[in-house]
Image (spheres, rainbow, N blue to C red):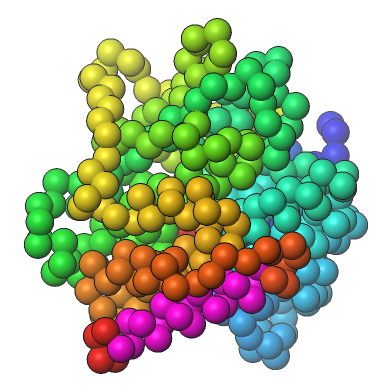
Amino acid sequence: MSARRTVVLLGASGSVGSSVLNLLRKQSDKFCLLGFSVHRNVEMATAIAAEFRPTYCAVSGLGESDFPRHLSLKFLPLCELAAIAEADCVAIAIGGIAALDPLMAAIGAGKCIILANKESIVSAGPIVGDALLKSKATLLPADSEHCGIFQCMRGDGGFRGLFRRTETVRHVWLTASGGPFFDAEGDRLNDVKPAEALRHPTWSMGAKISVDSATLANKGLEVIEAGFLYGLSPEEISVVIHRRSLVHALVEFCDGSLLAQMSQASMEIPLSYCLSYPDRAAAPEKAFNPVDSGPLEFQYPNRKSFPCLALAESAFRNGLSATCAFDGANCAAVEAFMREEVPFGAIPMAIGHVLHNLPPQRLSDIESAKECHCEAKRKAAEFLGRRFSI
Ligand code: NAD
Ligand code: MG
């Protein structure tokens, strides 16, 4: 039997983290957990340590002393764990821009990286791309649409890797479920509560990305993510609503062929693809039966009811400091909405305000991207505080 691949999982206590752990459980003959990170969830860390017996742990939001002694884990700083020599593969399932430093550390160490996090690419994509092209690291996008694009492009001889223009690709279509408020009319969206926004129709996910799916900001982030990862211009990417979440991405090639990636809506499928890359692991789950699934329908999104999508597209046309600001402003606005301080409709208002008031700047390194993100968050919070008397 060949040696098992060692996996470091950052963000193990989250929704994507749980899907990765499920895969490690199912494929324990192929993979073992070498180390993991949590932010504050001691209970989950204790359960993971007991079940998977990893060697290393990183805790970003608490101290080592908050953990039971008997766990016999070696505690490391997050970026050290991301770059650890013994790891064959580093899966990044941390939410938000906190993933940026460990991502850069893993790239610097030449790791095979499975990236679920999208905020890091939206806030610093070209900087991440430059570092990646100079290193021996491999980046595998695990966001389902981007993994779908990757699979379609890899099937084509013209694909030479991420962050490079692929000449044979003409257009990419990203599908969106439309979220829980797809049918909502006019003013109804003003009154929705966080609990309603969290009820996603087809995917089960963490809180922030669920709200982003409800505003369509998630699809906006994904347009930018796809643009940076695959060297596509805003005009070369379209978003379509596909309520069933069975088709994840379509790629049109220069000869008029359109390849689609389809599967059931489960993050375990793209994550398993990345874990086993360049092979495919056998799984008991069946793909869907195209007859039983019923019609596969597509329609254009309603940009008027869901302005976050158009705001993201406009940020993408304006370059990296605008996409970074989009992410920072969205982040602050979603946090305020989740605390029930501002209404749902305040999210696009705050993003629009920040994009309008933050002058474009050249972001040439990770530090300048983090500063721009922080400034956008601050400006969004200040705007919301004034507008809604928080
Ligand atoms: P989640 O909220 O369920 O989990 C987030 C994880 O990040 C947790 O383990 C948490 O401990 C960790 N974390 C939070 N703040 C941190 C900090 N400051 N420092 C270090 N760690 C921190 O989120 P999720 O739904 O699992 O999403 C994670 C990422 O994957 C996001 O970028 C999301 O957009 C992306 N993604 C998620 C899905 C999905 O189905 N959930 C699909 C595609 C992409
Ligand atoms: Mg996605």
State which quarter of the image contains the C terminus. bottom left
Q: In this rendering, would 316 be left or right of 97?
A: left
Q: Quadrant of residue 42?
A: bottom right
Would you place residue 179 above or below residue 237 in this image?
A: below
Q: Residue at x 28, y 27 (%)?
A: 298
Q: Quadrant of residue 98?
A: bottom right
State which quarter of the image contains the N terminus. top right
Looking at the picture, how far across and down is residue 70, in whole percent?
Answer: 72, 81
Q: Residue 103: in sight, yes or no?
A: yes
Q: In this rendering, would 35 be left or right of 239?
A: right
Q: In this rendering, would 49 be left or right of 194?
A: right
Task: Name the foreground residue: 191 vs 224.
Answer: 224
Task: Name the foreground residue: 70 vs 363.
Answer: 363
Would you place residue 304 above or below residue 324 in this image?
A: above
Looking at the rendering, the stretch of residues picked out in magenta corresponds to: 369-386
Residue extending farthest front: 359
Task: Name the foreground residue: 84 vs 149.
Answer: 149
Looking at the picture, how far across and down is residue 110, in whole percent?
Answer: 86, 50
Q: Residue at x 54, y 22 (%)?
A: 170
Q: In this rendering, would 287 be left or right of 388?
A: right
Looking at the picture, how far across and down is residue 346, in whole percent?
Answer: 27, 71
Asked whether 377 falls inside the magenta stretch, the response is yes
Q: Residue at x 63, y 37 (%)?
A: 231
So how many labels did they put on this image? 0
Looking at the picture, how far across and down is residue 217, in whole percent?
Answer: 38, 55
Residue extending farthest top: 255
Would you place residue 43 above or below residue 9 in this image?
A: below
Would you place residue 130 above or below residue 64 in this image?
A: above
Q: Residue 155: in sight, yes or no?
A: no
Asked whether 30 falls inside the magenta stretch, the response is no
Q: Residue at x 40, y 86 (%)?
A: 382
What secondary structure predominates along the stretch shown in magenta?
A: helix
